[in-house]
Image (cartoon, grey):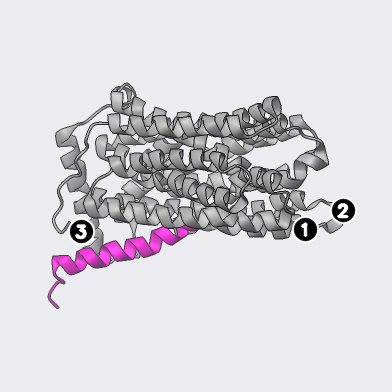
Amino acid sequence: MSPAPASAIEQNARRRIAIRLLPFLWLLYVIAFLDRVNVAYAALEMSHDLGFSDRVFGLGAGIFFIGYVLLEIPGALIVERWSARLWIARIMITWGIITVFVGFVHTPRQFYTVRFLLGAAEAGFFPGVIVYLTHWFSPRDLAKAIASFMAAQPLANFLGSPLAGKILGIHWYGLEGWRWLFILEGIPAVIFGVITFFYLTDRPSQASWLPQDERDWVTQELDRDKAKKKAVRSYTIGQALRQRDVILFTLIYLLGNTGFYGFTIWFPTILKRTSGLATGTITLLVAIPYLAALTATLMNSWHSDRTQERRWHAAGPLFLGSLALFLAIDSGAHLWTQLGFFSIFAACVYGYQPCFWALPTIALGEYAAAASIGLINAIGNLGGFVGPFLLGYLVTRTGSFTSGLVWLMANLFLAGILVLRLREFRLPSTQGC
């Protein structure tokens, strides 16, 4: 039998890899993001039950990211040098167990402690998956692959919001609904952590589920991409961490995450206090912006891959999101108008991320990119602490969300400016683009 044409081998390999890996990684991130942001929905009842002030809740929600930074760089390097399958499985099992423990807190100190430990347990998952995707996808497909993975963020909120509304109504065995929210959403992480150990494959050369000709094609394609990147730039880890562009990437993600998590963690509470609606109704309305975010994430990354342009596809949403937040503030207490602008804002803060994350993998060599992605995600995720904490602090001081939202708006606008300060990175030319 004559071998299949190269184009057929390429198409079959790309399709087989996408079908095998992306839905599973997407499901893992849905679980991860549910466990990260379920505190936003628990706050609708938890703060009242435990007597937590806005400042206490903001600190507890944000302190997750202090623990999160500890293993970011080592986690990304472990995936590069050791085993993504083992590391991701370990992460999921650990964070699932700790999520269950969050359901049993009673005091602010307990809340701070388990949120800190949860962040430390989950550290390395996101940058590890981004690095893992570079082991399977060439630069021309990377933004699309990252977008398929990151679409789990808005989808987790879209599905998790009404799910949280249902669970909050549960009062089994004398435990409040918000406690069951943590318990029931922590268990899937443990189960899928075990499945991950058996399901994922670290490298294409180990993929028994790929025919030999497709396995060879993928390996050769990725080797060519590495050689082209090295011909342009080959940083050591230390050099990469001192590069101007790596510093800019880190600042951009820090500012973007300040707006992203400040909004995500506080949005259900903002909507409830401005509208006065019941908790069940709020959890349904909160799903609307995340449907817009899911659509924007997929469309923006698709267009970025089609045009092979990254910078404006990252900067444009940041500018538009800043404008949408300004209009949401200006709309006052008009619920549906405000919800519409919040939907645009959510679409933008989610939609810029796949194109942003494609940039470091283009700009840096393989091992340096792994270290840099860990650094960018570690420091950038401190915005996940700063955003929720300072928003809660400003609400406590002023009695209004306005000043906090203005501050989030300024962070996004500055992030957009910094994206345009990045150099124009060219994607490696590839046959068949």
The answer to which of marks 1 and 2 sits earlier in the sequence is 1
- Label tally: 3
SS at mark 2 in the image: helix
Mark closer to the observer (1, 2):
1
Residue count near mark 2 (Cα–Cα under 10 Å), binned few <14, some 14–19, many ≥20: few
Residue count near mark 1 (Cα–Cα under 10 Å), binned few <14, some 14–19, many ≥20: some
The residue at 58%/54% (across/down) is 336
Residue 389 colored in magenta in the image: no
SS at mark 3 in the image: helix
The answer to which of marks 3 and 2 sits earlier in the sequence is 2
User: In the image shown, does 309 or 74 lie closer to the viewer?
Assistant: 309
Residue count near mark 3 (Cα–Cα under 10 Å), binned few <14, some 14–19, many ≥20: some
C-alpha distance separating marks 1 and 2: 12 Å
In the image: residue 93, left or right of residue 85: right
Residue 14 colored in magenta in the image: yes
Find residue 217 and name its label.
3
Find residue 169 and name its label.
1
The segment highlighted magenta reads 1-27
The residue at 55%/57% (across/down) is 288
Q: Is residue 345 above or below residue 115?
A: below
What's under tag 3, amino acid-wise?
Trp
The residue at 72%/30% (across/down) is 56
Q: Quadrant of the N terminus?
A: bottom left
C-alpha distance separating marks 3 and 2: 58 Å
Q: Which residue is mark 2?
A: 174
User: In the image shown, does 327 or 7 lie closer to the viewer?
Assistant: 327
Mark closer to the observer (3, 1):
1
What's under tag 2, amino acid-wise?
Gly
